Image (cartoon, rainbow, N blue to C red):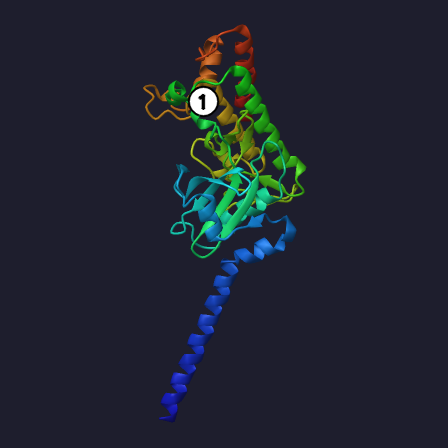
């Protein structure tokens, strides 16, 4: 009997020990979001309760858009200021909330005319939401792809050029002017929002990476969207990861702005037209003529040529 009790007691000790270790491991692997937010004190944006978010969005009445990880709703603050509320899908976003933290902390320390402003957040077990300034003209994506131009209208070449410059200034700020360099790692037309004057603002910092300016950057998984991801994110044979990954994505996006088409055409008849930069380069090599849609004057043509700098970025 004494031996059996001893064996049971020993087993209990082992179970308790392993459980404790698992809990410690889980704590290490899943850092508390609250700790991250409190660390930044007054720099953290305003925190809202679930009831506040429900009131601001009028019970989530007007949906602006939906993605794989979130839904975006239009809302209004008590002072009448319109806002956009991004509600994360909690059934998908599990784990340590890294992407939520990235977006809260990255944007809360930023103040730039070409970067969307984070006005507040909500973080509970059941609800994770981010509140941004409302961008009445939506994303750049709907104004540059041919299939959308009939309904949304094509932007003038001068305006497209201004938008490209604004985005470049926003990226330069992230890469050079912040105390800690911020890599966005998901630059694409869908993540570029336009205000009432079509001033561009970089948004969606869920995949962002914060790093000291001179450090070697380590990313365990490829981040971004197919068609915009820099080669070095796939293979270190192309070089080490740096802020230039955002420059590559920017270049792909500018080429889309020039050509009015997505950078990968899955329905292309000729394999040489499948990847847009190859198509642009081939045309320039053969006859120095792109045949761009919407180019009406010599001035427009000169602007379009300036924007072909996107090839240099890639």
Q: Is residue 41 above or below residue 272?
A: below
Quarter of the picture containing the N terminus is bottom left
The reply to whether residue 20 is visible in this rendering is yes
Residue 287: x and y in percent read 47, 8
Q: Quadrant of residue 294?
A: top left
Residue tagged by mark 1?
144
Residue extending furthest toward the front: 79
**Residue most extreme to the bottom:** 1
Q: Residues within 10 Å of mark 1 (few under 14, many from 20)?
A: many
273 sits left or right of 258 in the view: left
- The local secondary structure at tag 1 comes to helix
Task: Please give the name of the residue rendered at 45% of the width and 72% of the height, measured from the top-left corner.
Answer: 18
Q: Quadrant of residue 95?
A: bottom left
Q: Is residue 158 above or below residue 79?
A: above
Left or right of residue 301, residue 63 in this image: left
* Closer-to-camera residue (35/247): 35
Q: Quadrant of residue 268?
A: top left
Point 60% across, 44% down: residue: 108
Residue 205 in view of the camera = no
Q: Position of residue 74 (x, y in %)?
A: 45, 38
């Amino acid at each position: 009997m004494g031996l059996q009790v001893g064996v049971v007691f020993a087993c209990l000790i082992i179970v308790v020990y392993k459980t404790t270790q698992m809990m410690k491991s889980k704590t290490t692997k899943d850092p508390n979001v609250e700790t991250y937010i409190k660390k930044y004190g007054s720099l953290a944006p305003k925190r809202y309760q679930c009831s506040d978010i429900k009131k601001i969005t009028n019970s989530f009445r007007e949906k602006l858009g939906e993605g794989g990880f979130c839904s975006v709703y239009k809302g209004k603050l008590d002072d009448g200021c319109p806002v956009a509320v991004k509600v994360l899908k909690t059934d998908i976003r599990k784990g340590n909330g890294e992407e939520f933290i990235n977006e809260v902390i990255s944007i809360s320390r930023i103040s730039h005319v070409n970067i969307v402003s984070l006005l507040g957040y909500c973080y509970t077990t059941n609800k994770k939401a981010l509140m941004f300034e409302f961008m009445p003209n939506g994303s750049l994506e709907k104004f540059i792809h041919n299939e959308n131009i009939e309904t949304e209208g094509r932007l003038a070449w001068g305006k497209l050029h201004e938008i490209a410059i604004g985005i470049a200034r926003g990226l330069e700020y992230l890469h050079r002017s912040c105390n800690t360099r911020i890599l966005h790692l998901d630059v694409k037309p869908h993540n570029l929002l336009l205000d009432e004057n079509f001033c561009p603002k970089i948004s969606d910092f869920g995949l962002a990476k914060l790093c000291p300016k001179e450090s070697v950057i380590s990313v365990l998984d490829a981040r971004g969207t197919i068609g915009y991801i820099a080669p070095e994110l796939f293979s270190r044979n192309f070089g080490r990861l740096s802020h230039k990954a955002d420059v590559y994505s920017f270049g792909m996006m500018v080429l889309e702005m020039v050509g009015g088409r997505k950078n990968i055409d899955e329905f292309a008849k000729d394999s040489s037209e499948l990847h847009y930069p190859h198509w642009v380069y081939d045309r320039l090599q053969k006859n120095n003529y792109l045949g761009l849609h919407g180019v009406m004057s010599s001035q427009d043509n000169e602007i379009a040529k300036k924007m072909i700098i996107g090839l240099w970025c890639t």
